[in-house]
């Protein structure tokens, strides 16, 4: 058990340094190519940090564990939105571009609503069972392609506020930092998840709680490390673009690919978690659009973080009940 704790700590260290490399490399590439930081955050960084979710969800589906696959994606999205933005916003208030509030956050809400409509076949269409079919999965992938086309159209847009200065590296070094950072995030995330699950089993936690909390949070550790480091470095476009992009990527691409490879039955009990996801994303948009335009203040970030703590306590309470 001693070595499990040691490996857990080493995993966190690898994650944090990998996030540092990724943010530095991606920011330098964006600056050199004239691509906005938000575009890099919504694509390269978001997709890279979502690699653990893709691996876990795909392997779970192939192993016949549909609940783990859905739970990992939905749980990770809730963790991203409430916990990660909460932590990043407390480190440094997050100011974002108009497009993020007007388009990207609403697209994230659309993703949650679309998933709800596709998987609740019994309630909505009178089917015999709830299921993400290959057709449903292909619909998600079509929306993902549309999202990529939107990003392509906005790639050259400059930030509409002043970001912190970005350190420039040579092209080769920037690519090496980005790729190396992604590799370290995957490795560190796996180390943390594997050893956290071992500890959870040791202390008698159930598979359900492990899936909804530890596994979902564990596969989101790359997003946490990346957004926290980006917020600390004042690269707020990277910090929030990473979270919003990851949430869109998780539903449209990860469930799209997973469902295409292996159609999955859906447990309607997870609708509660989808409600939390949709409501939380809407609250984020309200915070940024009405209370303080395009800015997530520390007190708002604290509310998001508190919401995740309450949500987690409720899940544990339901398990004990």
Image (cartoon, helix red, strand yellow):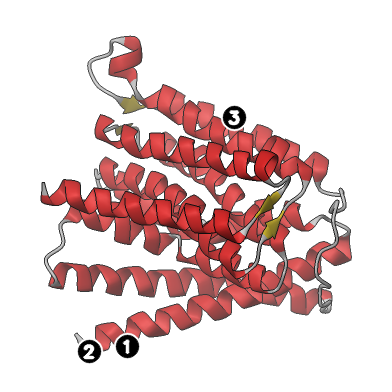
Choose mark 3 or mark 2, whichever is in front: 2
Q: Look at mark 1 in the image and give the residue it sits on.
A: 6
Which numbered mark, 3 or 1, is in the foreground of this view?
1
Residue 2 badge: 2
SS at mark 1? helix
* Residue highlighted by disc 3: 142
Q: Where is residue 292 in the image (x, y as percent from the top left)?
A: 70, 47
The residue drawn where x is 62% and y is 34% is: 106
Q: Earlier in the sequence, mark 3 or mark 1?
A: 1
Q: Where is residue 94 in the image (x, y as percent from the top left)?
A: 67, 58
Query: Around disc 3, counting alpha carbons within 10 Å, would you say few (fewer than 14), some (14 to 19), or many (20 or more)?
Result: some
- In depth, the one of 191 and 279 nearer the eye is 279
The answer to whether marks 2 and 1 mark residues whose Cβ atoms lie closer than 8 Å is yes
Image x and y of residue 270, in percent? 30, 36
Q: From this viewpoint, is residue 59 visible?
A: no
Mark 2 and mark 1: Cα distance apart in space: 6 Å
Mark 3, secondary structure of its residue: helix
**Which quarter of the image is occupied by the N terminus?**
bottom left
Q: How crowded is mark 2: few (under 14 residues within 10 Å), some or many (20 or more)?
A: few
Image-quadrant location for residue 48? bottom right
Residue 132 in the figure: left or right of residue 169:
left
> Real-space Cα distance between discs 3 and 2?
47 Å
Among the two numbered marks 3 and 2 on one chain, the one whose residue lies closer to the N terminus: 2
For the point 73% across and 45% down, the residue is 293
Q: Where is residue 127 in the image (x, y as percent from the top left)?
A: 28, 13
Residue closer to the observer: 281 or 184: 281
Residue at 54% x, 61% y: name it: 49
* 67 on left or right of 18: left
Between 59 and 69, the one lying in front of the other is 69
Kindly state the secondary structure of the residue where label 2 is placed. Answer: helix
Name the side, left or right, on which 67 lies relative to 283. Answer: left
Measure the alpha-carbon separation of dots 3 and 1.
Answer: 43 Å
């Amino acid at each position: 058990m001693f070595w499990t704790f040691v490996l857990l700590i080493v995993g966190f260290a690898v994650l944090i340094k990998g996030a540092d490399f990724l943010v530095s490399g991606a920011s330098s590439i964006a600056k050199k190519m004239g691509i906005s930081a938000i575009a890099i955050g919504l694509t390269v960084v978001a997709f890279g940090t979502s690699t653990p979710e893709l691996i876990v969800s795909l392997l779970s589906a192939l192993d016949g564990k549909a609940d783990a696959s859905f739970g990992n994606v939905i749980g990770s999205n809730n963790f991203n939105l409430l916990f990660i933005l909460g932590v990043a916003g407390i480190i440094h208030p997050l100011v974002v571009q108009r497009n993020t509030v007007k388009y990207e956050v609403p697209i994230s809400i659309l993703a949650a609503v679309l998933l709800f409509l596709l998987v609740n076949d019994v309630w909505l269409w009178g089917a015999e069972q709830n299921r993400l079919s290959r057709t449903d999965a292909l619909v998600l992938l079509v929306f993902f392609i549309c999202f990529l086309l939107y990003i392509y159209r906005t790639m050259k847009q400059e930030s509409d506020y002043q970001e912190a200065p970005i350190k420039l590296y040579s092209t080769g070094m920037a690519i090496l930092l980005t790729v190396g950072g992604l590799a370290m995030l995957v490795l560190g995330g796996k180390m943390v998840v594997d050893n956290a699950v071992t500890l959870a089993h040791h202390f008698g936690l159930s598979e359900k709680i492990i899936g909804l909390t530890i596994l979902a949070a564990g596969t989101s550790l790359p997003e946490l490390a990346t957004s926290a480091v980006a917020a600390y470095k004042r690269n707020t476009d990277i910090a929030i673009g990473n979270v919003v992009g990851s949430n869109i990527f998780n539903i449209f691409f990860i469930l799209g690919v997973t469902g295409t490879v292996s159609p999955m039955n859906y447990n309607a009990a997870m609708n509660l978690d989808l409600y939390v996801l949709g409501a939380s994303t809407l609250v984020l948009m309200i915070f940024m659009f009405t209370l303080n335009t395009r800015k997530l203040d520390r007190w708002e970030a604290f509310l998001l973080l508190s919401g995740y703590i309450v949500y987690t306590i409720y899940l544990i309470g339901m398990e004990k009940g």
